[in-house]
Image (tube, rainbow, N blue to C red):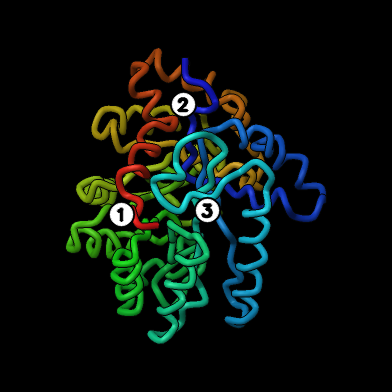
């Protein structure tokens, strides 16, 4: 049986558990609380972004959030393969890099790596100087600065994520990764278009999916009603990946960051329910796939691909 300590999640927003204890905190904790996180193998822990703020304010917010993430009792930051084993691990992920606005700012990537980040998503929903976001101009692709960003990030040892890029920028990011012989990942989302138009281009098209899989990248699926509408649609995406790319399909719940009602499916209400979800998954696709999807693939790739000198 798959236990919580076997589970790795490709995308969470647990930084929000250190935020203001307002009306949203109750349903954040229902998705994923810190005691559950400590029992899991690990999570990718995302920072936020202030898309339109001055660089200095963006950096101040980033440093505040990183301090909160590092300060969670009982959770350990993953910098290299030696940190992956055990439980309660966190991989720092920058979701939306809006403070790199011109070529001279690319040195910020070295600062991010030194802070402990190992995964980057250049885009969030808004367009930026690197490319087009999921809710931005759909015809905006990766810019020359965005291409330089990706090339330098790979050279430093980062993982790259195209989940919040629009379809055109996703296509361009995947092409750069393929040319460099590097994997491009899609940490959380769905195949196709979201059930709610509110989410913009938050899915990955079939063409982009095929090309991303060709790079060796991982695809994280998110059990969110706003993306899928119905539970069976989420299961259909899982079944698609189980058939065409079983060792590249992973779980990316986005838990604690899901703020649009309905928050979660009754069949998978929170991270603590992952072992029960895995048991059901095993009935349809076998225990090996269920184990890989719920954490083993992600854990093994981290062991294999994180910079050894970190």
Tell whether label 2 touches label 1 (CB within 8 Å).
Answer: no
C-alpha separation, residue under disc 2 versus residue under disc 3: 19 Å
The structure residue drawn at horizontal position 40% and vertical position 61%, both measured from the top left corner, is: 166
12 w.r.t. 109: above or below: above
Look at discs 1 and 2 and give the one toward the viewer: 1
Query: Which residue sits furthest right?
Result: 22
164 w.r.t. 82: above or below: below
Residue assigned mark 2: 232
Task: Please indicate whether residue 168 sits to the left or right of residue 105 in the image.
Answer: left
The structure residue drawn at horizontal position 41% and vertical position 61%, both measured from the top left corner, is: 165
Residue assigned mark 3: 199
Residue assigned mark 1: 184
Mark 1 secondary-structure assignment:
loop
Look at discs 3 and 1 and give the one toward the viewer: 1
135 w.r.t. 36: above or below: below
Q: Residues within 10 Å of mark 3 (few under 14, many from 20)?
A: some
């Amino acid at each position: 049986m798959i236990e919580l300590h076997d589970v790795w999640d490709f995308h969470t927003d647990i930084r929000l558990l250190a935020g203001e204890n307002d009306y949203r905190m109750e349903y954040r904790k229902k998705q994923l609380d810190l005691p559950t996180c400590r029992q899991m193998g690990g999570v990718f822990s995302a920072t936020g972004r202030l898309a339109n703020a001055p660089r200095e304010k963006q950096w101040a917010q980033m440093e505040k959030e990183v301090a909160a993430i590092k300060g969670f009792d009982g959770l350990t930051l993953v910098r290299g393969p030696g940190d992956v084993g055990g439980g309660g691990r966190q991989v720092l992920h920058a979701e939306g890099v809006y403070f790199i606005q011109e070529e001279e700012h690319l040195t910020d990537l070295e600062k991010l790596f030194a802070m402990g980040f190992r995964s980057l998503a250049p885009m969030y929903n808004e367009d930026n100087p690197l490319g087009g976001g999921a809710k931005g101009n759909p015809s905006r692709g990766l810019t020359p600065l965005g291409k330089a960003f990706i090339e330098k990030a790979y050279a430093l040892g980062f993982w790259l994520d195209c989940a919040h890029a629009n379809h055109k920028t996703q296509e361009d990011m995947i092409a750069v990764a393929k040319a460099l012989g590097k994997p491009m990942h899609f940490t959380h989302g769905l195949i196709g278009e979201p059930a709610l138009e509110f989410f913009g281009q938050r899915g990955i098209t079939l063409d982009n999916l095929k090309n991303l899989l060709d790079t060796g990248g991982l695809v994280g699926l998110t059990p969110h009603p706003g993306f899928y509408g119905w539970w069976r649609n989420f299961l259909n995406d899982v079944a698609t990946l189980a058939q065409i790319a079983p060792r590249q399909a992973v779980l990316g719940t986005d838990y604690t960051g899901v703020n649009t009602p309905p928050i979660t499916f009754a069949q998978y209400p929170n991270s603590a329910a992952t072992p029960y979800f895995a048991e059901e998954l095993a009935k349809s696709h076998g225990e090996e796939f269920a184990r890989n999807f719920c954490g083993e693939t992600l854990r093994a790739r981290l062991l294999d691909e994180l910079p050894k000198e970190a």
